[in-house]
């Protein structure tokens, strides 16, 4: 539909509070546990982010004095399959977070050859045996505005 590049940001479930607390998460790869990405790329267990897009995010976040961590994420479109054994398995694979779109968007952007960058902020925590529901309204308007500004800066830099 004419889009030349995509910047996506949103919340995620945190799998490792120690590594992610107070930081933006930059996905460097995504475990493909959803359906959409398989329509655009050959089957594989993971898909990697474009290193140039990752570097762009790092540059923008550093310039904006925003702490971040890079790592793998788990893309799942089956929230009721986020069981304790699966969460532990993904944690052991090095996943920092679980979300619902990164693998799909990475696949579509590679298929369409369109620059794509994504960053995440931790919402719910699945870092322990008990699900910690964190209301997104706790982030407040100022955080939402901050993330939007970061997204615009990333889009301009891509």
Image: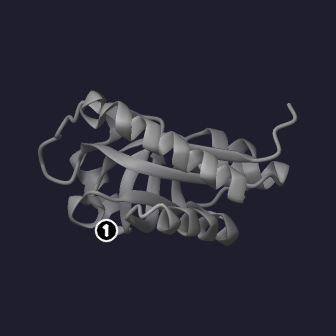
x, y percentage for residue 119? Answer: 50, 52
Question: Is 25 situated left or right of 8 in this image?
Answer: left
Q: Residue at the location (22% across, 58% down)?
A: 17
Name the residue that disc number 1 marks: 92
Question: Is 6 situated left or right of 19 in this image?
Answer: right
Judging depth in this view, the residue of 87 and 70 nearest the camera is 70
Identify the image quadrant of residue 36: top right
Q: Residue at the location (40% across, 56% down)?
A: 24
Judging depth in this view, the residue of 1 and 93 nearest the camera is 1
Q: Residue at the location (36% across, 37% down)?
A: 142
x, y percentage for residue 79? Answer: 37, 34
Identify the image quadrant of residue 47: bottom right
Q: Check the picture and name the quadrant holding the C terminus.
A: bottom right
Q: Check the picture and name the quadrant holding the N terminus.
A: top right
x, y percentage for residue 42? Answer: 73, 56
Judging depth in this view, the residue of 48 and 63 nearest the camera is 63
Does residue 5 appear in this view?
A: yes
User: Vertical placement of 83 versus 17: above or below?
Assistant: above
Q: In the rendered picture of this protein, how many numbered marks are placed on residues?
A: 1
């Amino acid at each position: 539909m004419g889009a030349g590049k995509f910047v996506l940001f949103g919340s995620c479930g945190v799998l490792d509070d120690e590594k992610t607390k107070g930081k933006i998460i930059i996905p460097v790869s995504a475990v493909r546990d959803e359906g959409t990405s398989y329509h655009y790329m050959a089957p594989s267990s993971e898909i990697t982010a474009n290193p140039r897009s990752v570097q762009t995010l790092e540059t923008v976040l550093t310039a904006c004095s925003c702490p971040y961590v890079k790592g793998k994420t788990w893309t799942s479109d089956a929230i009721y399959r986020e069981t304790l054994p699966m969460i532990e398995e993904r944690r052991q694979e090095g996943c920092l977070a679980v979300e619902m779109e990164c693998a799909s968007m990475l696949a579509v952007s590679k298929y369409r050859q369109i620059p794509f960058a994504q960053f995440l902020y931790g919402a719910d925590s699945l870092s322990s045996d008990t699900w910690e529901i964190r209301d997104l309204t706790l982030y407040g308007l100022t955080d939402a505005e901050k993330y939007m500004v970061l997204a615009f800066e990333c889009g301009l830099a891509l």
